[in-house]
Amino acid sequence: MMSTEEAYRRCETITRRTAANFYYGIRLLPPQRRRAMCAVYAFARRVDDIGDGTLPREEKLRRLDEQARALTALAAGSPDTGDPVMVALADAYARFDVPPDALGALIEGVRMDVEGVTYESFEELVLYCRRVAGAIGRACLAIFALRDPAATDRAAAARLADDLGVALQLTNILRDVREDAEDDRVYLPAEDLRRFGLIAAGDEREAAAMIVRLADRTAINSDGTAMDGERTEAGWLDALVRFQADRARGWFDRGMTLAPLLDRRSAACLLAMAGIYSRLLTRIAADPERALRERVSLPMHEKTWVAARSMFGGGA
C-alpha cells in the first residue's frame, strides 16, 4: 500500500515534468491545494496520453474504460492503493469535495477523440471542450479557496470555471491546428470551414489534408491576400483562425471574472494559468500563418513574469 505522501510526490513530479504551462500557476497555491491540483493534473495527463498515444483504437478504449472503473472505485471509497495517482486523488477528493463527475467527463471527452468524432457546429465543439477542459475547471474550482464562501453562488462560479476551461481548450485547438491535421484530426467546425470557403459541402473528409496543404503555402499579406493581390485559400484559413481566436477571447473574458471570487493565492493561480494561455491566443491571432507553420509557445521568462504579476494581482 502506497502512502499518501509518496503518492503526492509522484503526482508533483509528473506535473513539474509535463505541465509546461499549468505548473506556473499551480506552484503559487498553498501546499495542500497545490498537491491536490497536481493529483488532478496527473490523472488528466494519464487520460490525455491514452488518447494521444499510438496504441490501437480498441486498446485505447479499453484503457479509458479501465480509468473510468478506477474513478468509480475511488468514489466508492476503494481506490487502487498501489496506484499513486488514485491514492493522491482519493485524498484530494476527501479534502476538497471535488465533483465526482468532473474527471469522468474528461474520459468521455477523450473517448470522443479516440472514436474520431468530428464537429459540424461550434455548439458541438463546445460540448467537447466542456468535457475535456471545462470539467477540469470545475475540479480545480473545488480545490481553490473562495474569497467569501458564504456570499458566493457556487453554481455560477462553476459555470465561470467551465467557461474558462472552454477558452483554454479553444486556444489549444488553434495552437495545434496543423499538428492535429497531420494526425487526421480536425476540431475546427465544418460549418466554419465551409463559411470561409475552405471546403465544399460533402468534402469534410478532406479537411485535414487541406489544412496541411495550406499550412505549407508561401507567404501572404496580413490582410489575407496573395502577394499579387489575389485572395487565396490560405488567406481564408488565416481569417478562420482569427475568427476562432475572437470566439475564444469571449470565453476568456467571461471565465476570468471568476478570479475576484477567489482568495489571493487561488486567484493568482488562475490568473497565471489563464494569463499564459491568453497570451498564446493573442500571438496566434496576430500571426495565424506562423501558428499554422509551427507550434506557438511562450519563453520561460515570459511565463515566469506572468506568474509573478498574477501573484500581485495583475492580469495577463
Image (cartoon, helix red, strand yellow):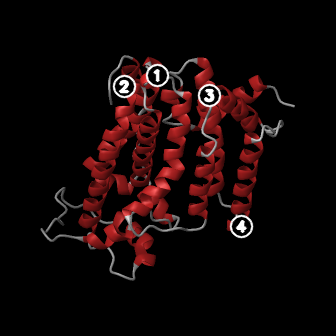
Q: Nearer the viewer, mark 2 or mark 4?
A: 2
First of labels 3, 1 by sequence position: 3
In the shown orientation, is residue 243 left or right of residue 302?
left
Tell me which residue sits at (53%, 45%) in the image. Answer: 135
Query: Where residue 100 appears, x then y in whole percent?
Result: 64, 42
Badge 2: few (under 14), some or many (20 or more) residues near its Cα, within 10 Å?
some
When the figure is inspected, residue 148 is found, relative to residue 298, above or below; the finding is above
Q: Is residue 89 left or right of residue 221?
A: right
The kind of secondary structure element at disc 4 is: helix
Circle 4 residues within 10 Å: few <14, some 14–19, many ≥20: few
Q: Residue at x 46, y 22 (%)?
A: 150
Residue 95: x and y, percent?
Answer: 66, 25
What residue would you read off at disc 3?
Answer: 96
Q: Please, what is the three-letter code of the amino acid marked with disc 1?
A: Ala
Across and down, in percent, residue 101 comes to 61, 46
Sequence-first tag of 4 and 3: 4
Residue 176 can be seen, yes or no:
yes
Residue 260: numbered disc = 2
Mark seen at residue 24: none
**Label drawn at residue 150:** 1
Is 289 left or right of 160, judged from the image as shown? left
Q: Which comes sooner in the sequence, label 2 or label 3? A: 3
The kind of residue on which mark 3 rests is Phe
Asked whether the viewer can see residue 306, the reply is: no
Say which residue label 4 marks: 58
Q: What is the three-letter code of the residue carrying label 4?
A: Glu
